[in-house]
Amino acid sequence: EMVMGDATAWDEEKYRLSILQERAVEARTVFRTVFAPISNRGNSPDILLAASSDGTVAPYSIPAYISTYVSGYEGPAYDLKFYGEGDDALLLSSGDDGRIQVWQWKEISDAFRNSWSVSVIQET
């Protein structure tokens, strides 16, 4: 019979795993950030994108403090780079799983203002 305060039933490994899982959910490392390009349609340059240790590429609306995730990697997402300018710009990201993903920035920008249904246009 277990009595309150009895340490004989203590499972240290289970406790350690629960703490690690909790920390993984609550914390992530941002490896790289980039500002979104200004489009020809007059969009303001107030969107910041971040590549994070949880495998996400997340855009942040600076004035609204809103974040929504574009896509995930099997491991951490390490780097972001824009190629081109305005509506023709491409967003490239790389992750720990060795993949490089490419998105059309116009599609991401439009989705950010709508429902976030974005697809990768190329993956290597």
Image (cartoon, rainbow, N blue to C red):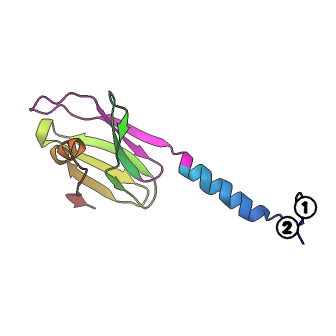
The C terminus sits in image quarter? bottom left
Dot label at residue 6: 1
How far apart are the two marked residues, 1 and 2, measured between alpha carbons? 7 Å
**Up/down of 45 relative to 16, above or below:** above
Of residues 86 and 41, which is closer to you in this image? 41
- Residue stretch in magenta: 26-55
Query: Which part of the image, by quadrant, shows the N terminus?
Result: bottom right
Residue sitting farthest toward the bottom: 1
Instruction: Please give the residue where the numbered disc 2 appears in the rendered image.
Output: 9
Which residue is at the front of the view, 43 or 83? Answer: 43
Residue 122, position as x, y percentages in the image: 22, 59
What crowding class fits label 1: few (fewer than 14 Cα within 10 Å), some (14-19), or many (20 or more)? few
Determine which quarter of the picture holds residue 49.
top left
The label shown at residue 97 is none
Residue for point 16% across, 39% down: 84
Q: Residue at x 40, y 40 (%)?
A: 32
- The part of the image, by quadrant, that contains residue 73 is bottom left
Residue 2: x %, y % from top left: 88, 68
Secondary structure state at the residue bearing disc 1: loop
Do residues under tags 1 and 2 come within 8 Å of each other at their CB atoms?
Answer: yes
In this rendering, position of residue 121 left or right of residue 7: left
Q: Identify which residue, 100 or 69, lies in the foreground.
A: 69
Q: Is residue 44 above or below residue 50?
A: above
3 drawn magenta: no
Q: Residue furthest left?
A: 40
43, above or below 90, in the image: above
Q: Quadrant of residue 105?
A: top left
Type of amino acid under label 2 = Ala
Total marks in image: 2
- The residue tagged with tag 2: helix, strand or loop? helix
